[in-house]
Image: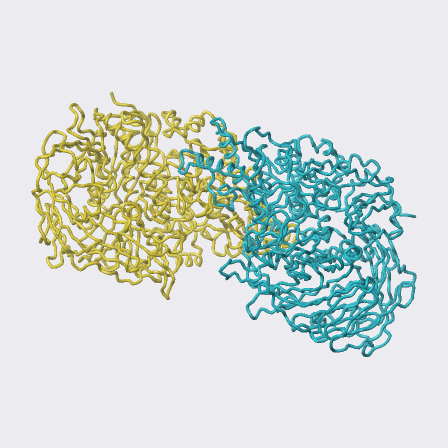
Chain colours: A cyan, B yellow
């Protein structure tokens, strides 16, 4: 089949590019692969390797599989080795050992493998003879990869940027190692707890022919079983032309488990097939009969003469012999009955073989355009708590994504010396892998054990250590100075030893966006006045303010500054600008702190007023559009169910949000306030009690109102678990409707107590209305739209008209019985009394038609914040103080999603149109980018376009076509690019290229 | 090596014999084997296959092994298949699958397998390709069989006859299947709970070079660790000339488990070796260091530069990859350290390879002549309860052994039509296998779960069904009558539908002893007078007595007779005699029952007097020797500990006997009595309350006083577990000494609160003095010896001088935490309120010098009781009413232990001298048996002698020689046989032969 042609064969101009690897451990595989083209025989893998089925019989596709969490109760490495089996018996090294051995014994057998993070660990420990045997299994379709990302990502709390990266990482390993036969045909998210539309859209753009998952709302499932709609066509984008974001989607019959009574793993207790008539307990007849009953019952809920049975589960197949020996017998004994008139045919299969049969059925399928959130497995069991669980880890993951993009970009811009330079040897792989692992559905989701959460964080920190070397080397190459460079990772709590102690230092502000940025720099200092010069030596406005009590408390002994220096830094696209800071005088800062709330804070764009009686926010005005809403804000906590209610024994836990009552408790009706008002900075500092404080802030240039909240340690001495929210109550007539984004991209409409595809029986008035917010949420009416941009994934809802609430922090005293086995009660590290979390919300008030113009760039700025690095003393003479990697800023609608090294002289880039269709008059239109005019220091000498996951040439990506029940719009051809180098981007489109580059002279 | 020569090669006269198999399922293997001699390459198995060791280093022999109970928490078939894994995760089919696969991957690896009951089940399901691969592994010593019996027999509750049979069964399978390389060199009883001297004697005579076990008294172990005597030479017989019963014996260091921290089975949680430095938790240095510490510490407790580590445990290696992958790494990393000066060398090994190194050390070893009973694992934890646990199963096993011997004999005597004849197709294999399974150390021991005990009983019953056909066919062939034949299995509770209903019937009394027997026949009947004619038509004395109330109660609705017909039957050696019974009159029986105790009951040999006040036994007199002792007897119960004491939380359970107090509670100080006194029969019927009764009985010809006890249902309404004993208190001055037999053969001296090899600190004054009684126990002084012959294995002791107590029944309310997980509380079947058990003790009072003359034949008669079968109506005209398979009775000292079919025209026989040296003036001397003059209907045309287990020619059995510390007596050559056909038997000798036979014309 044409789409099985070698990924590398048509890249004539670029053929050497893919030969070279960017990851040292892929060397041998990648280097050998193109030389050894014949070994990847694609004639018998993929759909062609499927076993024959029997027409007119019920064909039961048995899919042997294992579900290997990339961390959960144990760390990813513990899972790989089978360490800490006292926590959970699981050892992936043995699973792969065992499965391969069993596959080799019988060519009929099939297995699918999913998580490349594990497969890669295993592969690199195998001798060449074993690698050869496995290649053969893959070439013959006996071992098939599905999904194939580094992990099976979470869908509710991940950002699309990191998901695309982790999929690219895993799929590249498979491509490099196995060629076309290693390319997964099917996306496979059997465990994630709800399903995001943006994930479906990405999977479609990655070339998957279909998608299977296991978990959905119990009411939704009941309904779909009744209507035979467990298999459907998901139209996953409102912006992309069908079928580009159409994804055939199947809901698996038993989650991802085998039917009851047919689990033959070592971890199961079901009776084996006992077929020696000389021994006791001969049970072949019984097994065959029970199997027929299970198959026929399952067939009632699906449309075709084919059904799928997932024969496996968590970390199963460690001793694959148990499974295969019994499956072999099952197939033999069930099919033998056909001679006696049985109409059941059982076969070893894979999800793609099953999918192929569904496709051959040539039916039409219901079209779905919303998503599968929230997920409830019963009336009082909504998995909406994990939208917020472990807020510090969620923020750290988001920050690390920005750091990885910066690291990737600087690795490219700095050239080869980035990896090995004056600061030693660095790499981006460590952080790339750490980020990929962190996308797992029990990682950033916050649903892992504490020690595993610590491990994810440790990996990210370690990855960043490796990246710091790359960044330092690169900046040294670009600036011409190898002066020592310091990174301050605790600036969010205003700690930075260098700025605190130094009388003169310089600040490098690196901006990873493809357009210039203005960013408020805020540094801990001890002097009272400073001079700040920009890269041209021009002084910039700055302000020293006393450090708040709240910040000093949360900072603890990580710093000792008493003041903060604030100034607005500008940085060019994909580049840096260097500021010089020197002490002007000591003594108390000029900006005085006034007790009590001010009437208002404002700059030229925004005004926020305060209630003098309560100290709370009172209204918000957009001074440009002259619109004002009433807006109050306060903090509350839901009392977490402890599982002792008579209605349900469900407690709130890492997964589940279940408030004991629909009314949250207010933390304080009033805030103790003080304020600072200078031309540079206006802020109101609010204290709501010993464990909640907030700063409401306006910088001189900001169009959004910043609310920096600090929550914790959440008190539990009263024995009550608490789920803390911030709630905005406005005069907007939202009519029960609110909007949340999907994985940081397209926005979905939400309506209280409503689901688009079935009549909801609402049983949890709060938890049942929570949705994931990855980067933004809003409410609106005809006139006003209030948009909140978040700095991490959080859960939120609009329970009352005009209201928007966001859950910030959770501290719980009970496990919620979904396996993690711990209450979510974070106390480790520097917070032995309970974790303190700080974050920022950015509020934007606009007319609805202009909202996207504000929140799209605002959110990207928030995701890809500038990286600050510090050098003691002034900038070295002769060093380059400002640099941009681009010839010019890209249009505001165009985001440079990816820029990273691919091969020795090739890059991977992704250009993204970051506006949805119709949401902006100005920006929701096609834009053209000229690739040759992109970079300032690199010449683009070759280009080839890939699918989103960079594992297939775009023109070879021929997906199975599926027909929706409703008449589809005729497919419009995408706009043809004006030339090889000029590419057009339409709303929400992401285009992926490999560029061959050379340095400009 | 010469002893590896083919078993078959020197049997010139008999060569076709062994070619033919007696078990149909061995056909292919046995038939093919001699034709394919070359395939069994013995040049690289056995000791020659051992890996090299390093002189002067500490050599650590890693022995991968699995311990597979032939039934315990699950039935043997459930264990084989891995059924009921909810009870215990264990599936032997997968263990063997997995181990073989792993052995094939790496020729360095070794494995030992032990239980042929499982291996046989697995083998017969393997395709020829797999069988071939396994043969190669065996030929190369990579897979080595140790022990190799059908099971690993219990040592405290088994009878030597059944143990020899089960060993023969297992070892024959190995011999037939694998030839010399399949012959185990080492006996391996790693789990049994104490060790019998007779077992050691048998193992020596079976040709084992050494013996390893895991459990011994904790004080004994401490002592042996201190004195470096965990390896020793066991001289296991007082009668056999050394070294015939000498057995090198090693006590394993960790039971049979790996050292702490090194269990890499799927069932363990120890950290795997994590040797990828790129991953977290790299632990190679830690593992190597911990291993060196474990090895060095273990080496302190043994004498040589070699230590053994048992790398495995219960049902381990189901996923052998886990073990081997980590062991491979362990060996590699530990030995790599030798380059840095480490003095530790690790290797894959087997018990025989370890044994070989001990032998090469050429040391002298402490000599041990007692046994390893009782076993205590701590101060209050004596494993002496299982000596009695499940008394009904223990009896059923003993009865079944007799039935199997009868079946074996009649299969031979009846010729080919025994297996297929007028009553259909029968076989002895089913019962042989059932008996073999029942010897397992959690079978007849009574330490299995109730459902498993039921399974053992069911197997025995099923085996007997198969044997009944053999017996009926054989008796039809021998008698010339195919008249229908009925077996009454409930005669012990006087139930037999035929005799109860019939007016005329005949009784066939088959005697499996090699000498004539007189046996009291006791049949349930409803008429009041009968005529009984012997085989010559001569009337014999008989007596009808009313059936006791106690018997009617325990019989329940299994019969409806009101009387019992009693007469003394005589039967010829290895033959039968037929009696005809017909009703003479109805009405009440002539023998009247008198209320109250008689002054005495007596016959011409024995008198027993009774206390008129209590109804209890008062004295016993041997009328021949004119000796009298005071003798009282009563029933008591120990209050079983419930584990709630402050001293220890140990409760009595299936394994452990722990009375709450050393004084048992009396059941009743007096017995309600009635008596029957006729010339034929004198009996006193005693009732001690609702749940204990007894009949003290003398038949006219018996020299022993019979005490038939009936106990149960043991009441538990008071919440107390009860361990019921019968206690004989006599005037014998026993001085704390008593005697018990070992597995039904040689007798050991026991002394209260004393152990022969160390200074005992006695912590359990009753339980710590209990010993197994398999067939007899006695106390004595200079003048009197009181011997009690039991009908099953029981525990017993002499706590007070002149006293002998035997535990009869146990009903317990707590588990004893040794794994079985159930209280021993038998309630199933026809006894829903609690099991009722009935049994017999036979008391013999003699001078000590004459005691053996009485108890040796008495015990054999009790073990091999005649088999009664019944035919409606009189004997068919012309049928042969009396038959003997022997030309003449063997001398009283000679017991025909085995007579069974071996090949199509060959027999296996064992001749046993059943007296110990010096115990009888008359019988403890050599006897000669002429094999050609043995059988009346078979001509012996060839003979070849084998070792005891019939898996090696006696002249090829060359065992490793071991030197005891004390000077050994010079080896006396055994008496040379006078001729090829005349064989000499010396005291306690058993000689094993294969005879080629032909029918006499």
The quadrant of the rendering that contains the N terminus of chain A is: top right
**Can residue B747 be spotted in the picture?**
yes
Kindly indicate the quadrant of the structure image that contains residue A669.
bottom right
Vertical placement of residue B422 versus A942, above or below: above
Q: Is residue A846 left or right of residue B608?
A: right
Q: Is residue A476 left or right of residue A720?
A: right
**Can residue B960 be spotted in the picture?**
no
Report the number of discs: 0
The percent coordinates of residue A840 (x first, y second) are: 73, 63
Q: In this view, does B970 lie to the left or right of A436?
A: left
Q: Is residue A532 left or right of residue B799?
A: right
Nearer to me, B611 or A588? A588
Residue at the top extreme, as displayed: B1001
The percent coordinates of residue B207 (x first, y second) are: 39, 39
Nearer to me, A902 or B126? A902
Vertical placement of residue A611 versus A127, above or below: below
The percent coordinates of residue A489 (x first, y second) are: 74, 63
Vertical placement of residue A539 versus A82, above or below: below
Nearer to me, A438 or B490? A438
Kindly indicate the quadrant of the structure image that contains residue A571.
bottom right
Nearer to me, A573 or A236? A236
Kindly indicate the quadrant of the structure image that contains residue B499.
top left
The percent coordinates of residue B556 (x first, y second) are: 22, 45
């Amino acid at each position: 089949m044409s789409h099985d042609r070698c990924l590398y064969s048509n890249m004539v101009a670029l053929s050497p590019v893919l030969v070279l690897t960017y990851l040292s451990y892929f060397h041998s595989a990648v280097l050998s692969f193109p030389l050894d083209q014949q070994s990847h025989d694609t004639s018998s893998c993929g759909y062609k390797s499927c076993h024959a089925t029997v027409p007119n019989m019920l064909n039961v596709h048995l899919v042997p599989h294992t579900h290997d969490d990339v961390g959960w109760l144990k760390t990813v490495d513990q899972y790989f080795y089978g360490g800490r089996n006292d926590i959970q018996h699981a050892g992936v090294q043995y699973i792969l050992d065992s499965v391969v051995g069993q596959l080799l014994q019988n060519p009929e057998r099939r297995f699918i493998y999913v998580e490349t993070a594990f497969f890669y660990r295993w592969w690199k420990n195998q001798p060449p003879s074993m690698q050869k045997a496995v290649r053969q299994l893959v070439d013959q379709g006996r071992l098939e990869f599905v999904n194939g990302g580094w992990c099976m990502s979470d869908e509710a709390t991940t950002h699309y940027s990191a998901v695309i990266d982790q999929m690219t990482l895993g799929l590249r390993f498979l491509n490099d190692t196995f060629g076309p036969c290693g390319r997964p045909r099917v996306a496979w998210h059997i465990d994630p707890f709800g399903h995001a539309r943006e994930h479906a859209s990405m999977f479609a753009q990655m070339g998957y022919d279909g998608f299977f998952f296991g978990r959905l709302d119990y009411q939704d499932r009941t309904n779909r079983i009744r209507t035979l709609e467990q298999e459907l066509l998901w139209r996953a984008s409102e912006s992309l032309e069908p079928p580009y974001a159409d994804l055939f989607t199947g809901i698996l019959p038993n989650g991802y488990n085998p039917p009851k009574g047919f689990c033959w793993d070592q971890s199961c207790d079901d009776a084996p097939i006992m077929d020696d008539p000389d021994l006791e307990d001969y049970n072949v007849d019984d097994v065959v009969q029970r199997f027929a009953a299970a198959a026929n019952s399952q067939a009632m809920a699906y449309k075709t003469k084919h059904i799928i049975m997932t024969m496996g589960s968590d970390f199963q197949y460690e001793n694959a012999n148990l499974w295969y020996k019994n499956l072999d017998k099952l197939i033999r004994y069930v099919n033998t009955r056909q001679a006696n008139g049985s109409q059941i045919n059982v076969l070893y299969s894979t999800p793609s073989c099953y999918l192929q049969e569904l496709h051959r059925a040539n039916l039409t399928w219901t079209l779905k355009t919303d998503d599968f959130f929230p997920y409830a497995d019963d009336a009082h069991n909504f998995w909406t708590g994990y939208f917020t669980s472990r807020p510090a880890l969620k923020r750290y993951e988001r920050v690390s994504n920005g750091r990885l993009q910066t690291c990737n970009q600087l690795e490219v811009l700095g050239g080869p010396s980035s990896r090995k330079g004056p600061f030693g040897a660095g790499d981006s792989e460590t952080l790339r892998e750490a980020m990929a692992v962190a996308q797992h559905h029990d990682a950033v989701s916050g649903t892992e054990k504490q020690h595993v959460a610590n491990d994810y964080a440790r990996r990210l920190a370690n990855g960043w250590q490796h990246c710091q070397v790359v960044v330092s080397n690169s900046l040294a190459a670009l600036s011409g100075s190898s002066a020592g460079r310091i990174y301050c990772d605790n600036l969010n709590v205003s700690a930075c030893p260098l700025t605190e102690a130094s009388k003169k230092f310089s600040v490098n502000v690196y901006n990873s966006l493809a357009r210039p940025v203005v960013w408020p720099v805020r540094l801990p200092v001890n002097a009272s006045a400073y001079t700040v010069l920009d890269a041209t030596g021009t002084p910039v406005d700055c302000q020293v303010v006393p450090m708040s009590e709240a910040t000093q408390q949360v900072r603890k002994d990580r710093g000792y500054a008493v003041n903060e220096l604030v100034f607005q830094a500008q940085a060019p696209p994909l580049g840096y600008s260097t500021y010089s800071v020197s002490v002007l005088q000591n003594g108390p800062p000029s900006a005085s702190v006034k007790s009590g709330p001010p009437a208002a804070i404002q700059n030229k764009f925004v005004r926020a007023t305060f209630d003098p009686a309560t100290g709370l926010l009172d209204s918000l005005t957009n001074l440009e559009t002259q619109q004002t809403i009433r807006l109050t804000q306060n903090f509350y906590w839901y009392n977490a169910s402890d599982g002792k209610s008579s209605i349900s024994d469900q407690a709130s836990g890492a997964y589940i949000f279940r408030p004991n009552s629909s009314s949250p408790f207010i933390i304080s009706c009033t805030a103790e306030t003080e304020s600072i008002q200078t031309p540079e900075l206006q802020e109101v500092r609010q204290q709501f009690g010993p464990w909640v404080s907030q700063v409401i802030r306006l910088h001189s240039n900001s169009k959004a109102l910043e609310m920096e909240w600090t929550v914790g340690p959440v008190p539990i001495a009263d024995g009550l678990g608490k789920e803390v929210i911030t709630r905005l109550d406005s005069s907007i007539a939202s009519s029960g409707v609110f909007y949340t984004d999907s994985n940081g991209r397209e926005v979905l409409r939400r309506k209280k107590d409503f689901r688009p595809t079935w009549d909801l029986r609402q049983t949890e008035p709060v938890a049942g209305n929570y949705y994931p917010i990855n980067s933004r949420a809003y409410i609106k009416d005809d006139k006003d739209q209030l948009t909140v941009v978040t700095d991490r994934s959080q859960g939120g809802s609009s329970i009352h008209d005009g209201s928007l609430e966001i859950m910030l922090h959770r501290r719980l005293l009970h496990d919620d019985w979904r396996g993690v086995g711990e209450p979510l009660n974070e106390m480790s590290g520097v917070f032995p009394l309970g974790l303190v979390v700080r974050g920022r919300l950015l509020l934007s008030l606009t007319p609805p038609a202009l909202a996207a113009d504000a929140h799209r760039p605002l959110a990207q700025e928030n995701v890809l914040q500038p990286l600050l690095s510090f050098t003691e003393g002034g900038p070295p003479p002769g060093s380059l103080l400002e640099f941009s990697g681009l010839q010019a800023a890209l249009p505001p609608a165009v985001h440079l999603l990816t820029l990273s090294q691919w091969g020795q002289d090739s890059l991977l880039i992704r250009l993204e149109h970051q506006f949805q269709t119709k949401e902006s008059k100005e920006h929701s239109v096609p834009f053209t980018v000229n690739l040759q005019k992109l970079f300032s220091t690199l010449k683009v000498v070759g280009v080839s376009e890939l699918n989103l996951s960079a594992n297939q040439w775009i023109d070879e990506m021929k997906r199975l076509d599926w027909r929706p029940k409703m008449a589809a719009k005729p497919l419009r051809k995408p706009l043809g690019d004006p030339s090889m180098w000029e590419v057009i981007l339409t709303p929400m489109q992401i285009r992926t290229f490999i560029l061959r580059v050379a340095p400009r002279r």
